[in-house]
Structure formats: structure tokens, C-alpha cells
Image (cartoon, rainbow, N blue to C red):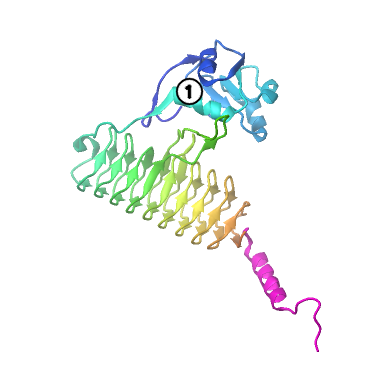
Amino acid sequence: MPDPRFFESLTTLDVAGLAERIGAEVLRGGDRKVSAVAPLGTASSNDVAFLGDRKFAEQLKATGAGCVILPAAAAGTAPETAAVLVSPTPQATWAAASLLFHRPHALTRAANPAEAVEDDSVVLEPGVVLGEGVRIGRGTRVGANTVIGPGVQIGRDCHIGPNVSIGFALIGDRVKLYAGVRIGEAGFGAAGSRTGPVDVPQLGRVILQDGVTIGANSCIDRGAYDDTVVGENTKVDNLVMIAHNCVIGRNCLIAAQTGISGSVIVGDNVIFGGQAGVGDHLKIGEGARVAGGAGLLADIPPGETWSGYPAKPIRQFLRETVWVSKQAQGKPRGKTEE
């Protein structure tokens, strides 16, 4: 279930009624009641899940979902305990279902600052807007024209710069967010449908642990369903992008203009040079280093340094660079000395 501090639960439907509203076909279990969406791996008996890729077939077999949305070719692999809906575009159909069950709390009314702050040591500069349910710990300062959305929790002794926006987030103590930071915007999730790409609602959160620093104009997207997490004491430079569902370890250093794609797992004490780019669903081991400008398309084992595009172990990259340089300086083929 999405965090009720950030998302409103809307309704309960039987599977047949749900199918009618989202354009799916009922294969079995039309009278089953469902009230939420969830991924296959965490779904319970009241949830609707989907299979969008065959690599998740084992999760489908083990899922506790009350209803699953599948392509017709995979319908026979669903567990007997689940109701089954068939759709040629399962993820887009699941996205339509999520809109029926969940809605983000809107910032329709500013909260009374006295109800949001822990004590008089909290400073709210001119133009700060607080949503309902916001809580801010003692000693925290919030910069001018910053907007903090409904339900956001901010710890003690934090520094929030001007023109920051924060939503769907739980923030620890001693966190620094510099000017223009965007925390908790919807991640880039799109699914193909018969009418073209459709947005997949993002139902997760952002968790910034104690001592995190986020540089000016950096963006950290909330999770698609699970959380985006930045570990204790990690330092993020200006103009960095961390996409949905990433889990960044503790004591990491991420230099300017680095871009980390969705669902990347980063161990503790990892260093990213400036303008590093990381492909989605990768794992970067503890103590690894990604050189500036590297384009990472594969997992990095713990402790290794990778460089280049596509990135590879730095010694291999340097050997290949030297070899190419020597070839470029050699004599053209077909010519002989006079």
C-alpha cells in the first residue's frame, strides 16, 4: 500500500468491475475484491499486480497478489490463488488501475506553520509554503519560496535552501538541500499502449538519511512503487540526476552532472566523477569508483575503478587507449618508405 501520508486510497472494486473500467478481459476470479496496486514481489491478496516481462516469471509464480494482469500468452502461468486479467499491454493497464485506487494528496491548503514546526528554533524564510501533515524538526532552516508538500517529514538541524521543492519524502537530521533542489518528483516511467506511451503513476517515496547533502538544482525522483533511498552522509554535487527506485549507499560522493538511471543499487563509499552516466538496473559494489565522463552499462564489482564509454576496468581502458593511439600514429597501410 502506498504511504497514506502522501497518497489517498480511493475505492474497492471487484475484478470484473475493474476489468470493465480499464479495458481488460477477465479470465477468472471476477468476483474477487481488490483495493490497491503493487509489484509482483510485494503484492498481497487485496492488490493488483502485473507481468510486463518474462524475466519476472518466477515472481509471478510466487506472488501473493489477489489479481494479476498478464499478456494472453502468459495467462496459464498465473498462480491458482489469483484472479487473472488479460491485456496486450499489461503495464499500461496496471497504470490505469492505479489511477482508480490511489491519488496523491494535493497541496490545496497551506498548513499553519505553528503546527508543522517542532519549536521556535525552526526558521521559515519569506514565501515558504507548507502542506498539511508536514513536520519539521528543531534547528532546521527553510529558505525563501520553498514548497514542502503534504506529509513530508524533515528532521532536526537541516538546511533547506531557497526555491526548493520537496514532496513524498522522509528526510533525516542534518540534511542540506541547496537552492533549486527537486526532491520527490515523479520518476520517468512510461508504458506502451495502443494509443502511444502513457505515464505510469509513481507511488513510492524518497528517503534521505542523516547527514546527506544535495547540491543546487539536483533532482531525486520518488520511487515507482518502492523507495528511492540516499544513505547516510552521502554528498551529491550540483546538477545531479538520481532516478526512481535507486538505492545509494552511505558515504558516497557524486560529482556534478552525474546521471543515475532507475533501479540502480550503489554500495557504500562509492565515488562518481563528473558527468558519469549509469544505465538502469545495475549494481555498483562497495568502494567502487566511476571515472568522470564514464558511461556505465554493466555491474561494477566492489573496489574496482572503471572508465571510458562503454565503461570498463581502468587498466583495460588505458591499455586499449594506448593501443589505439599507437595505431593512429602508425604508417598508413599500402605505403612504403622511399
Is 244 positioned to the left or the right of 318 in the image?
Answer: left
Residue at 30% from the left image edge and 41% from the top image edge: 148
* Viewer-side residue, 231 vs 161: 161
Would you place residue 163 above or below residue 44 in this image?
Answer: below
Residue 254 percent across, percent down from the top left: 47, 57
Q: Which residue is mark 1?
A: 36
- Mark 1 neighbour class, 10 Å CA radius: few under 14, some 14 to 19, many 20 or more: many
Residue 290 percent across, percent down from the top left: 55, 59
Residue at 28% from the left image edge and 46% from the top image edge: 146
* Viewer-side residue, 140 vs 37: 37
In the image, the segment drawn in magenta is: 310-338
Residue 36 percent across, percent down from the top left: 48, 23
Q: Judge whether residue 315 is colored magenta.
A: yes
Residue 120 falls in image quadrant:
top left
Q: Can residue 37 be seen in the rendering of this structure?
A: no
Please tell me whether mark 1 sits on a helix, a strand or a loop: strand
Residue 331 percent across, percent down from the top left: 75, 79
Q: Judge whether residue 128 is colored magenta.
A: no
Q: Can residue 45 be seen in the rendering of this structure?
A: yes
Quadrant, the C terminus: bottom right
Mark 1 residue type: Ala
Residue 107 falls in image quadrant:
top left
